[in-house]
Image (cartoon, helix red, strand yellow):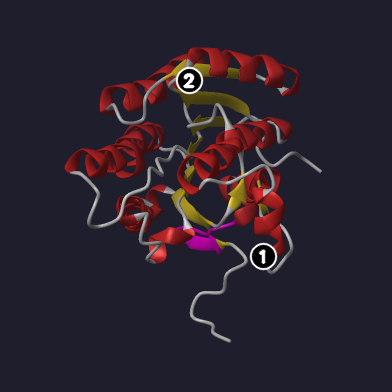
Amino acid sequence: MEALLTDRVVLVVGGTAGLGAGIARAALREGASVVVTGRHAHRAEALVEQLSGLGPVSFVVADQADVAQAQDAVAQTVARHGRVDCLVNAAGLTTRGTLLDTTPELFDDHVAVNLRGPFFTMQAAVADMVGRGAPGSVVNIITMSSHGGQPHLAAYSATKAGLAGLTKNVAHAHRFDRVRVNGLNIGWTETEGEDAIQRRFHGAGDDWVERAAASSPMGRLGQVDEIADAVVFLLSDRSGVVTGSVIDWDQTVLGAHD
């Protein structure tokens, strides 16, 4: 059976660690040429070295909060590969803040990374697809918190809710261009970044994963490789005509009560 992303060029924004790195790995295994972006060159170089045996992979140092850098990542991908077929917006900022203690600066930081950056990265990538008259696919990594979220994630929840709405807007606008745009509302996932957040903001100890898993319906947190497989499926033709879907990828069933 042919790999899901054979001969596709995939740009993974925020792809140098955690879920983004997992998506890059999965895309390479499915036959893609992959470009990852991130703010730290040393982290990107280490990932590229690690993944190079799986297929063509390179990086662009870019800060998603900077519109010029975000769009330049698309331009560099096109310059290297002639096009961008698939885009994954996996960067995200989750700095804690409630309605009462979030500063304008913190709010603006969340808007820049979680909403403005994806908007203008999609603008550049979709422009390439439409300009070539070619089909394309976008997957935005959103969050279950976009449905409302926790009190300490006020800015995060607001900006990710905006990204969910933007996903549907762009999907509708470009459906006749055969550009499919979908999103995943991911739940609590075990990543290096989540480990740092739990320790920094919640005083978590070395056993926090085990404790969180024990309280979860499935007895574990979400795993990077599982989510990455779902992203690759949505990027690929195997997901058919699906567009404008924001899928809850979690073990919480919204609207259901005991």
Amino acid found under the numbered disc labelled 2: Gly
Say if residue 169 shows up in the picture. no
Q: Is residue 136 magenta?
A: no
- Check contact, mark 2 vs mark 1: CB within 8 A: no
Q: How many marks?
A: 2
Please, what is the dominant secondary structure of the magenta stretch?
A: loop
Q: Callout 1: few (<14), some (14-19), or many (20+) C-alpha neighbours within 10 Å?
A: some
| Residue 91 coordinates in the image, percent (x, y) | 45, 37
Q: Callout 2: few (<14), some (14-19), or many (20+) C-alpha neighbours within 10 Å?
A: few
Asked where in the image residue 153 lies, by quadrant, the reply is bottom left
Q: Write the start and end of the magenta stretch as one range.
A: 240-248
Which residue sits at x=55%, y=57%?
187
Could you give the CA–CA distance between mark 2 and mark 1, rounded to whole angstroms? Answer: 45 Å
Q: Residue furthest right?
A: 1
Which residue sits at x=81%, y=43%?
1
| Residue 31 coordinates in the image, percent (x, y) | 70, 31
Which residue sits at x=58%, y=26%?
34
In front here: 17 or 134?
Answer: 17
- Is 196 above or below relative to 249? above
Say if residue 2 shows up in the picture. yes
| Residue 9 coordinates in the image, percent (x, y) | 55, 29
Amino acid found under the numbered disc labelled 1: Ser
For label 1, the SS is loop
Q: Locate residue 20 relative to residue 104 in the image: left or right.
A: right
Q: Earlier in the sequence, mark 2 or mark 1?
A: 2
- Is 66 above or below relative to 100? above
Which residue sits at x=37%, y=25%?
63
Which mark is drawn over residue 82? 2
- Is 6 above or below relative to 157? above
Q: Which residue carries the number 1 mark?
A: 216
